[in-house]
Image (cartoon, helix red, strand yellow):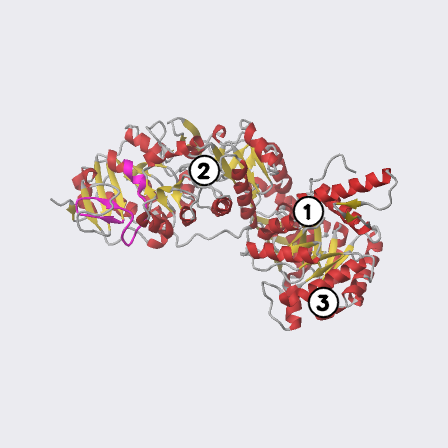
Amino acid sequence: MRRSMLFLPGNSPNLLVNAACLGADAVIFDLEDAVSPAEKDAARILVRSTMGHMDFCGCETIVRINAVDTPYWQLDIDAVLPEGPGLLMVPKAGTAEDVRTVEAYVTRQEARLGLASGAVGLMPLIETALGVENAFAIATCSPRVRALFLGAEDLTADLQCRRTKEGREIAYARSRLVMAARAAGVEVYDTPFTDVNDDEGARSDALTAKSLGFTGKAAISPRHLAAINEVFSPTAEEIDYAYEVMEAIAAAQRQGKGAVALRGKMIDAPIVARARRTIATAQALGLGREEQV
Amino acid sequence: MEIARPASAGTMESSDAYVEIEPREDGLEIQLESVVLDQFGDAIEQAVREVLEAMGVERALVRVADRGALDCVIRARVEAAVLRGRGDG
Amino acid sequence: MNKVVGSIREAISLSGLRDGMTVSFHHHLRNGDYVLNLVMEEIAAMGLRGLTVNASALFDVHAPLLRHIEGGVVTGVAASYISGGLGRAFSRGILQGEVEFRTHGGRPKAIAQGVTPVDVAFIAAPAADAMGNCTGKFGPSACGSLGYAFADARYAKKVVVITDHLAPYPLQGWSISEDQVDYVVAVDAIGDPKGIVSGTTKMTRDPVGLLMASYAARVIEASGLLQEGFSFQTGAGGASLAAAQFLQEIMVRKKIRGSFASGGITGCLVEMLRAGCFESLLDVQCFDLKAVESLREDPRHQEISAMQYAAPGSRGAVVDSLDVVILGATEIDTDFNVNVHTDSSGVIMGGSGGHSDTAAGAKIAMVIAPMFRARMPMITDCVTCVSTPGRHIDVLVTQGGIAVNPQNGELKDRLRAAGLPVMEIRQLKEKAEGITGKPKAVSRGDRVVAKVIGREGELLSSIRSVPQNP
């Protein structure tokens, strides 16, 4: 479950050591933009050492490696792969080829290190116009791709437009990414809201992302995590409805009925699938009902 | 591994450590300054020695200015300093 | 009649101060205070010896006091708080005797009852008239409340008001009145405004502080006490201020009108007053300019003496009407005893201030502190120094979880029900040590350098000397 992901600079020990407590479902150790070229080596070692020694108490660890057009990304992978990151975030993914390059290297290193093949998933960071246009191809280029991630700061620079709080300039990219990811059957995560002092803005930005179909949203400040988690958690009403759906299905099966209606609406396969997802999330959050399987 | 030139890693910020390494004629010398010297001085020195040993560093002067870094941070900073100062890299 | 005398030295000699007597000071000018140094300089120059300095607090700015101790001018020190720069010297054993720490409520009580009688009190007054009516609300060195000085003025045998803003008689809005004052001295400056109050108090951006603050606000929300008539106190630290701001959001959203906030007042609490969260502020000390301005302008914002604030066993103390107080700690042990006097190595760097007074009085005393600072875990088996006994502490909030004192089972149930991460304090200690490693016990010196005296006058703890690191 990744409602929220928190970016943490890869070379800041005081932030890394508290990563597990800050309330994010996942943390993203950033070896890319948050680390200057002169400190890439030290950050890589620090992130590896931290991942190896700290207990993250169930908080997933994701590493943003450097882009494939830099001399760093292979060293990044070499360092963190043995520590079992939940995902590798691949920045500046413009084409399927970019991601396949990383995939091939990860596969080779997994074999070399004797790690389970295919264990580490990739999360391409879509932050260029080219990447948005290629979103579906990227999402489907490898079974390692588990999710797409929208990066709006670089994208708006590439689009030659101004990044705004309202985000009208990224509306198309958001919808396009959700469409591509859902068509490919992978998750999709929204760009962080960058004004760390605007709590209301963060909440409303999360609501927008949720309404468009995003699975979750990243943050650059722990302050925004509570709102993001709340927005991307199922509501009590949604949970109740999901259980009703499952009960109606079970009842229909007992009675040998084919079509099932609930509250005057036909329940079809997508509704059941959604109900299952809602219940799974609710259970992960401790909001599920005990008797239900 | 031989230390060929002076190198450093880390910062003086809280929860970090600044590690300097220099070539030395013979043996290891570790100089430690720490805000938690009384409570963790031995543990820090042991961590430094373990990293040096694992990396095969037998001759070096290592100066650690610790600002309350956790064990995994100390180890990372020593490793980074060694790699920056090594002769064969 | 006119009580103005020409110089501090003249006031000292008129007061009859002799060897071995006690002089007192208050700390509202905090690290900007000039008065203590000016007075002690004169006392030393006059050749007096063996004096006791009883100050409500000592700050780094008072470092010249160490010279007077070394020279034998000062042989006794009593305070409610000593900052780190001076604390180190006392921990090394600069004083032949022992520093006596009392609480903000215990200090005026001891003065009033003659346990620690004051011979001459020196009142640093940002505004005064020629008869000695004085206040902190006006003048170039305005500091707001003079709460800690009231007992000194009332009970000292002689009272000297020192001001840099002599106003026409009668001063309006006085805090301490002329009937208690013997002499008035005008000086160029009683303090450096930059060190007296901070301009603004900003919301912390430290993620750990913010997380603890949000837990703290949720603990209060879940405690059952957050309702009409709620009363509250918090400190000026980053996490405490953030907790107050989160609390304000909750109170405004739920339209809860509290009764009062007390203690040291910040702009943050002034905001809460203006937002309708409280009916009044009871102010023993102002921390920033916004608080000073509010005390001057807003009749709902009232100055209180340290006696009224916190004195135990008096006819009435504000702390006894408190619902919730948020407190800090340098260490807390598994019996919830709190240390705010020394750091983990045993070096003096603080003091109780109102810590144990408010903890004893409030229905819920909450300590917020990170699980560890740099690498030092905050939860120990046994605190270096007991500043506030564990029986007065109800709940500990850290970024890694919340521990409730077992004696407060109802609160524990409420916090659990609210979905807060409640755990045993021992679990929390193990969790922190899992991250930091277990610190080695630090050896202490043989000499007692300070006594921590509880609010009822009982000896709570003895602080031992710290060997000097080479």
Relative image position of residue B30 (x, y in whole percent): 61, 49
Q: Amino acid at mark 1?
A: Pro
Quadrant containing the C terminus of chain A is top right
Q: Is residue A151 left or right of residue B66?
A: right
Question: Does the magenta stretch mainly form a helix, a strand or a loop?
Answer: loop
- Tell me the residue that label 2 is attached to: C228
What residue lies at 32% left-to-right and 39% top-to-bottom? C304
Name the side, left or right, on which B1 lies relative to A114. Answer: left
Q: Circle 3: is it few (<14), some (14-19), or many (20+) Cα within 10 Å?
A: few
Identify the amino acid type marked 2: Glu
Q: Which residues are magenta?
A: C126-151
Between residue C302 and residue C177, name the one nearer to us.
C302
Vertical position of residue A283 compared to residue A124: above or below = above
Residue topped by disc 3: A70
Q: Chain of mark 3?
A: A
Residue with the mark numbered 1: A234
Tell me the chain of label 1: A
